[in-house]
Amino acid sequence: MRYPIAIEPGNDTTAWGVVVPDLPGCFSAGDTLEEAMIAAEDAITGWIEAALDGGQDIPAPSHIEALRAVHPEFAEWLWALVKVDPAMLDDTLERVNISLPRRVLHRLDARARSAGETRSGFIARMAVETREAAHA
């Protein structure tokens, strides 16, 4: 899947700005066009993860031509597509095999029990909460 981005050209004193019109509030910037495009990938990934964690629907990508027609404010900007791995939208359960020291596994199971959760549920919740805390 590819999301269209609008890119405001930068210069010697301003960064290249990027807006993702399909994802409200999703934007980024970079000192070069390449940095701006990489930052856009990170911004889109973060936006989608936060939306999924919050139970929101993810808007489908629009066609660039359709966006150009409804966003005249981007008339002088460049347009590009940023690829998004569809697997990041997949909430299908997947069985995994991990190795942990017994003492760590014991501690993990004790914390899961005290939270009233399964080991898998506890690990998943902790991963989501850690991501949210890192981006707060």
Image: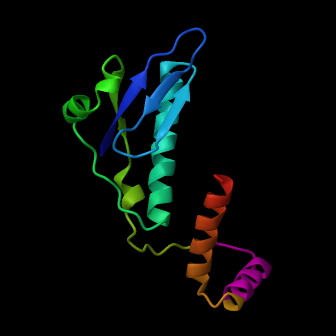
Residue 79 is left or right of residue 121, and the answer is left
Q: Quadrant of the C terminus?
A: bottom right
**SS majority, magenta:** helix
Q: Is residue 98 visible?
A: no
In the image, 91 versus 109, the foreground residue is 91
Q: Is residue 107 visible?
A: yes
On the image, the x and y values in percent for residue 23 come to 39, 46
Confirm whether the magenta stretch covers residue 87. no
Q: In which quarter of the view is residue 132 placed?
A: bottom right
In the image, 91 versus 31, the foreground residue is 31
Q: Give the range drawn in magenta.
A: 99-112
In the image, 17 versus 33, the foreground residue is 17
Confirm whether the magenta stretch covers residue 103. yes
Q: In which quarter of the view is residue 13 placed?
A: top right
**Above/below status of 105 relative to 86:** below
On the image, the x and y values in percent for residue 56 come to 40, 63
Q: Residue at x 67, y 87 (%)?
A: 115
Residue 26 is left or right of residue 83, and the answer is right
In the image, 129 versus 127, the foreground residue is 129
Q: Which residue is drawn at 53% across and 18% down?
A: 32
Q: Residue at x 59, y 73 (%)?
A: 125
**Above/below status of 64 relative to 8:** below
